[in-house]
Amino acid sequence: MNVHQEIAAVKSPPPLSPEVASESRRPRPAPGQEAPAIQPKLTVEHLNAWYGQNHALHDVNLVVPPRSVTAAIGPSGCGKSTFLRCLNRMHELIPGARAEGTLRIDGKDLLGRDVDPVTLRRRVGMVFQRPNPFPTMSIRDNVAAGLKLNRVPGDHAEIVERTLRQAALWDEVKDRLGASALSLSGGQQQRLCIARALAVQPEVLLMDEPASALDPIATAKIEDLIHELKERYTIVIVTHNMQQAGRVSDQTAFFYMGDLVEVGPTEKIFTNPSEKRTEDYVTGKFG
Amino acid sequence: MPPTSDTGAARATPAPARFANLGDRAWGWGISILGGTILVVAGLVLLELGRVARPAWEGMNVLRFLTSTDWDPVQEKFGALPFVYGTLVTSAVAILVALPVSVGLALFLSEMGPRRLRPPVAYAIEVLAAIPSVIYGLWGLFVLVPWLRGTLEPFLQGTLGFLPIFRGPMIGHGYLAGGLILALMILPTIASVTIEVLKTVPAALREGALALGATRWEAIRMAVLPYARPGILGATLLGLGRALGETMAVTMVIGNSPAISASLFAPGYTLPAVIANEFAEATGDVHIGALASLGLVLFGITLLLNAAARILISAVSRGTRGARA
């Protein structure tokens, strides 16, 4: 399957049943998704997720171009975090949770049973809602933690410095790399966690409301950082904060009640959405 | 605001407030008294032990009492060292055997094991904790001791016989038997406390490690165990406390011989065991006094080990304190 066929498949997935198709529960492809000139980094097709009996994600289809930021927005419980967790199979940690569908990075399926989630997670890094540095480790060891797991030989010091610079934290911590990670402020800890995720050079970086536990100044720093990181990485970010989605993302996906209602260029989603539900949400009528 | 309503409000509110205050204060006093009782009881125990022990102290050299290996009540020769040695050796064997097994069990139950297997194993641990110690003693006498004599001790001597602790005649009764029985008895304590400690490890830490591409075991080693270390030490301390004071089961399998031997196969004696064995038949105040003094020594050992463990725990928990908040 070449790139264009693949994208075409994403655009118009075969309907599961006439009812589903006529209800148009499946998102229509947005203009931004119609003609990506480059091969997508991440392709999600027919992604369904369940928690026990609860069908939490309904047939999500989404394409993420490389070196871009995709924001997932929507009210609480809409499935956006579930979606993010499926992308590196962290949902498997929750008892009773399962996901079906196709998830591809550079065209290779990663959700199959024969794929080790450990291998996937080394390619898809994640930053969590609350900063979670390893409390017993120093700043340096936190950044190098992933390198040790991957048994990366050679000079960790050089990688640690480069990654901390990428995470815009180097100048603040260069004189105390041996200090406990807990000696940092919340915003610094979150940037440390970003550095920790970047150290293993993932291809995709997932961020689950990375600034929701931070004050406005720390939030601004994280947002600036996202702008810089998209030069190298493909980023998918979940956020509660619509202004934040507007500021940092190129493409926005609106989730509601487990459906991916609409996805398109951020500017279009916020100014001229195709779906009524999207418009109601971004204009503050609910959510 | 008109002055009338102001005073009216002032009159209406303080009465219930004062009542609430009174209740609070009474509650506070009640709690303080209950809490203080513990200190009073501990103090009384110490005082009473001292009073009973006193007759043995006349003309006795404390240092000699603690370092002499001679225990001969008939000739009124009293040396505490064999009992102190036996208590420490059996407790050490117990911790060395029980700690790894308990932590493994706790990890299995809270992190790795199949969910369906967890309840029966957890239940078995609780049952283990509920068995009376005399039953452990009987089991030790009829099952453990013959097995040690016939199987484990010859095996250890055959493979690790170059170590002095595995030399000498293999009787079955001895330090090893006492230590293993103790290990079995403190295992449920250490395991169940460790399970609770592992439950307090924030899920975010585990997820952080897994998201970096750690396997289950790597996540445990990198994020879970370092965070839980102070708690596991605390669990070990609880187990050690029980091992030091356990009387019945150890008395039944240790051989009850007031001697010091490097070999774990040799019979020995512990502080609680000698007190239990000799107290009823003790003749004269001096013998009783000597036994009470052994009780004070046991008290002292427990206090010392507790203090040492506390220092250790506060040293290793320095790194995790902030994350608990």
Image: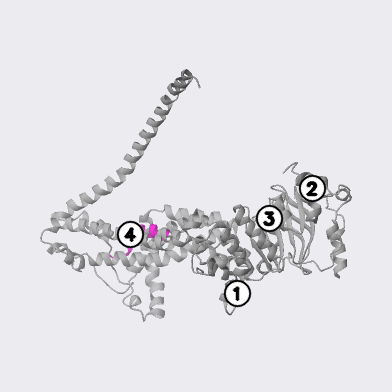
Whether A246 is drawn above or below A150: the answer is above
Q: Specify whether residue B238 is painted magenta.
A: yes
Q: Amino acid at mark 2?
A: Thr
Mark 2 in CB contact with mark 3 (< 8 angstroms): no
State which region is magenta: B235-255
Q: Amino acid at mark 4?
A: Ala
Looking at the rendering, which quadrant does residue A192 occupy?
Answer: bottom right
Looking at the image, tell me whether mark 2 or mark 1 is earlier in sequence order: 1
Q: Which residue is mark 1?
A: A159
Front position among marks 2 and 4: 2
Q: What is the tally of numbered marks visible in this picture?
A: 4
Q: Real-space Cα distance between discs 3 and 4?
A: 47 Å
Which subunit holds the residue at mark 1? A
Q: Which residue is mark 3?
A: A97
- Identify the image's colour scheme: rainbow, by chain, secondary structure or one colour: one colour
Q: Real-space Cα distance between discs 2 and 1?
A: 42 Å
Task: Check if mark 1 and mark 4 are on a common chain.
Answer: no
Q: Real-space Cα distance between discs 3 and 1?
A: 36 Å
Local SS, label 1: helix
Task: Check if mark 2 and mark 4 are on a common chain.
Answer: no
Local SS, label 2: helix
Q: Viewed as shown, does residue B286 lie left or right of B265? A: left
Front position among marks 2 and 3: 2
Which residue occupies 71% across, 63% down? A235
